[in-house]
């Protein structure tokens, strides 16, 4: 594995105080997405250099890094999103955007609520943007819903297995621990653990050429990437119901009581 220098100007130290403040706010309001990015910045120190080194060590990674495509720009182009044939990953992503009302631009804007090095003209910053901009593609590939906290927690655990970073681990662990109290059972936490195991078993999706992947039939892509059926996640959805699958939303209505 190639060894690259750290991000210029960084201390290499994790900011646990900021991370714990952000996780407290996120658990009180699971829709406060800005806190996710605060946690990532505070704890994922050194993560982008490690993953960038992993990318350029792959067969296609050097070309992908050389091309340096800004995926959010492509994903925000209506003509590009409309170009995918039915049954493809891109078509499923298009359906995802239409059904949720989410957008690549919206994810970018939330990530910019606190200043950091994300917009720098640097290979590590570009890779960080690549991980950010493909988050919703991973929702589509894994089947984890984006508009419920169970689905987000499972994808966060999947992401930790894929790209590392203690920020992902903190969010998944905190959501799982809180679910033991809120749901009076372990099914939520077991589904999150399943997400981690599935992330470990799958191919490294960050090394994919997304402009090619989006044209691939989605079931074929899942098989090729080794993305398993989320059995415990489906069971948790069915048994917990919508309210407990998104249990953190209830606290948003009465934060003082929480």
Image (tube, rainbow, N blue to C red):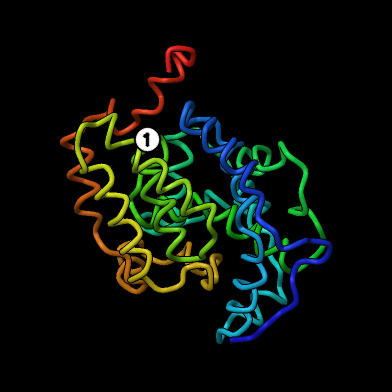
Residue at image mark 1 = 148
Please tell me which residue lies in front, 79 or 127.
127
At 65% from the left edge and 50% from the top edge, which residue is drawn? 42
Residue 197 on image: x %, y %? 31, 64
Residue 94 on image: x %, y %? 47, 46
Compared to 61, does 187 lie above or below? Answer: above
Compared to 132, does 113 lie above or below? Answer: above
Please tell me which residue lies in front, 153 or 44.
44
At 34% from the left edge and 28% from the top edge, which residue is drawn? 247
Q: Work out which residue is located at the far front of the displayed protein and give it.
A: 17
**Number of numbered discs:** 1
Q: Residues within 10 Å of mark 1 (few under 14, many from 20)?
A: many
Q: Is residue 106 left or right of residue 229?
A: right
Compared to 160, does 99 lie above or below? Answer: above
Q: Is residue 46 left or right of residue 32?
A: right
Quadrant of image for the C terminus: top left
At 51% from the left edge and 64% from the top edge, which residue is drawn? 164
Quadrant of image for the N terminus: bottom right
Quarter of the image where one finds residue 161: bottom left
Residue 184 on image: x %, y %? 21, 32
State the SS at label 1. Answer: loop
Residue 40 on image: x %, y %? 60, 50
At 63% from the left edge and 46% from the top edge, which residue is drawn? 76
Please tell me which residue lies in front, 57 or 47.
47
């Amino acid at each position: 594995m190639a060894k690259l220098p750290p991000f210029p100007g960084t201390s290499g130290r994790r900011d646990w105080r900021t991370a714990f403040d952000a996780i407290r706010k996120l658990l009180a309001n699971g829709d406060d997405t800005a806190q996710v990015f605060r946690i990532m910045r505070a704890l994922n120190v050194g993560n982008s250099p490690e993953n960038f080194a992993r990318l350029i060590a792959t067969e296609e990674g050097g070309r992908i890094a050389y091309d340096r495509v800004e995926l959010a720009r492509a994903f925000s182009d209506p003509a590009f999103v409309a170009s995918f044939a039915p049954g493809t990953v891109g078509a499923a992503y298009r359906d995802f955007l239409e059904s949720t009302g989410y957008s690549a631009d919206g994810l970018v804007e939330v990530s910019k609520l606190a200043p950091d090095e994300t917009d720098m003209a640097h290979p590590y910053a570009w890779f960080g943007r690549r991980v950010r901009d493909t988050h919703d593609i991973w929702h589509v590939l894994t089947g984890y819903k984006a508009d419920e906290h169970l689905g987000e927690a499972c994808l966060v655990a999947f992401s930790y297995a894929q790209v590392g970073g203690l920020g992902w681990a903190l969010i998944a662990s905190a959501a799982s621990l809180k679910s033991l109290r809120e749901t009076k059972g372990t099914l939520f936490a077991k589904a999150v653990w399943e997400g981690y195991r599935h992330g470990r078993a799958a191919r490294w999706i960050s090394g994919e050429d997304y402009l090619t992947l989006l044209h691939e039939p989605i079931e074929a892509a899942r098989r090729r990437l080794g993305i398993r059926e989320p059995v415990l996640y489906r069971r948790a959805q069915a048994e917990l119901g919508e309210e407990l699958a998104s249990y953190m939303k209830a606290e948003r209505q009465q934060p003082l009581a929480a």
